[in-house]
Each structure stands twice: as structure tokens, then as C-alpha cells.
Amino acid sequence: MTFRTLETASEHDGADMVEIFIDDNPVRARRGQNLAALMLTGTAGTFRASPVDGSARAPFCMMGSCFECLVEIDGLSNCQACLTPVRPGMRVRRQL
Ligand code: FES
């Protein structure tokens, strides 16, 4: 399943748009946009693999409770994407 965002004025005119990297791929996003929401609109259907059985995991609660959205951000593993705003130049890796 792929989600999409509603187009905002800033997306339309390019204001407050920044570039980040997800698995080394450049992605344009709104500054301050929720990282998990951004990733759900892209190709990152799976955010991490379960350390128990390797099953694919993705955000469930979007409010910091389930820990299904863990990703590596700027070299720091196990960050909750649903609680992280987009910052210019941030480097995100899925934990697969
Ligand atoms: S989606 Fe549940 S903690 Fe992030």
C-alpha cells in the first residue's frame, strides 16, 4: 500500500523544501515533515526487519508507542521515524 500527501502551497512553490537521503537515495521533503509519513509516501514499505524472525515491519501507531518504525538516522540506529521531523541533509537507512 502506498500513501500520498495532499499538496500544500509550499510543495507547489518549492518553499521550505529540503533534500534528505533514504538508503542513499536523494528525496525532497518539506522541512519539519514527519519522517515516517514521508517514508510511507515513497517506496519504503518496510522500515525494518524483526530481529526475532526477520519479518517485515512498518509503522503502526504513528505516536511513539509501538516501535515498529525504527530506522537509522545519521548513523544512530533504532530512532523512531514517527517522532522525527525532517531536517536538511539527514541520512536515513532502513534497518533491514
Ligand atoms: S509508528 Fe509506532 S512508534 Fe513509531
Image (cartoon, rainbow, N blue to C red):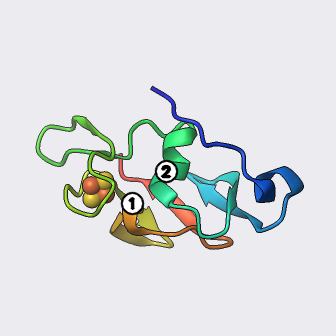
Q: Is residue 27 above or below residue 5?
A: below
Front-lying residue, 65 or 72: 65
Give the mark nearer the N terminus: 1 vs 2.
2
Front residue of 32/87: it is: 32
The residue depicted at 36 percent of the width and 52 percent of the height is 95
Looking at the image, residue 47 sits to the left or right of residue 86; the answer is left
Question: Which residue is drawn at the image coordinates 50% and 59% (left, top)?
Answer: 35
> Farthest residue toward the right?
13
Q: Look at the numbered disc 1 and say if its residue's Cβ is closer than 8 Å to ligand 1.
A: yes
Which residue is disc 2 drawn over? 37
Q: Measured from the top left, where is residue 69 in percent x and y?
A: 33, 53
Give the residue at mark 1. Answer: 82
**Label 2 Cα neighbours within 10 Å, binned few <14 / some 14-19 / many ≥20:** some
| Three-letter residue code for mark 1 | Cys
Q: Hey, which residue is sitting farthest top in the picture?
A: 1
Seen at 46% across and 68% down, the residue is: 73
Q: Quadrant of the C terminus?
A: top left
Quarter holding residue 54: top left
Return the x and y of residue 76 as percentages of the image width and height.
40, 73
Residue 94, position as x, y percentages in the image? 43, 51
CA gap between label 1 and label 2 equals 7 Å
